Image (spheres, rainbow, N blue to C red):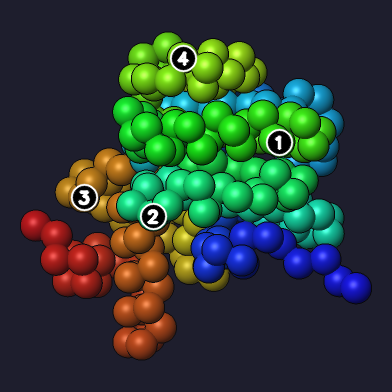
Amino acid sequence: MEKRPLQLSLGVTLNDESTFDNFFAGSDNNRQILQDLEKFGRAEGEKNLLVWGAPGCGLTHLLQAVCHQVWEQGRAVQYLPLRDVRGFSAADICDGLEEAEVVCLDGIDQICGVKEWENALFHLYNNIKDAGHYLLISSHTSPPSLPIVLADLRSRVLGCVRYHLESLNDADKQTALIMRAAARGMDLPGEVARYILSRASRDTNELFYMLNTLDEASLQQQRKLTIPFVKETLHLK
């Protein structure tokens, strides 16, 4: 019987574009993190990792890239965006998740101080460890600064191997935009990418969302990515 990814059981979907091949690392530090996360996805090395960084640095992309990698190997994986599920019963959602060979908890900073969620994640951590499976956690807050109230959960989170994902500088964001556009079959000239960066949000999530808008508009109107077209489509000043 074909093994299906457990993420489908919670109705959580993954972005098809969130792969390792589609992630521009920038710095040597980030490239090393990519290599280590790929090893993690192959069930090599440490079993408990935590990667943290500023909003927009690509944490969700990397966690989903791990999920895609694990799924492609035919192994069971569960991706859990804590920001989106924190309003639901923690006990119900976490029940049985340790059956997945890899569990990715995206945004542990989102549930800090929520007693029900802290207790549920503490037990989930222990169950994953007992099962001999793998856990990957992300946070937009540095691990020592996480306001986790439950001491036992805090000690386990801080016991993970930790990585700091650095934000891209403007030159790297320009390269990332051009690379992402090329992956979509679009030719994004350097001067157009610079124009976008000079007038739009520096958040990479917002920038890539703009690429989606440009892709759809260029296909509908059969127009190239020029500054006038980008200005008109994105309503930039």
- Please give the residue where the numbered disc 3 appears in the rendered image: 200
- Per the image, the residue denoted by label 2 is 88
* Element under disc 2: loop
Tag 3 secondary structure: loop
> Which kind of residue does numbered mark 3 sit on?
Ala
Residue 26: x and y in percent read 52, 32
Q: Amino acid at mark 2?
A: Phe
**Residue 72 seen:** yes
Q: Is residue 89 left or right of residue 120?
A: left
Separation of disc 3 and disc 4 at Cα? 42 Å
Residue at the right extreme, as displayed: 1
Find the distance from the CA under tag 2 to the CA under tag 4.
23 Å
Q: How many marks?
A: 4
Q: Nearer the viewer, residue 14 or 149?
A: 149
Secondary structure beneath disc 1?
helix
Q: Earlier in the sequence, mark 2 or mark 1?
A: 2
> What residue is disc 1 on?
128
Where residue 79 sits: x, y (%)?
58, 51
Circle 2: is it few (<14), some (14-19), or many (20+) Cα within 10 Å? few
- Report the amino acid beneath label 4: Ala
- Residue 151's mark? 4
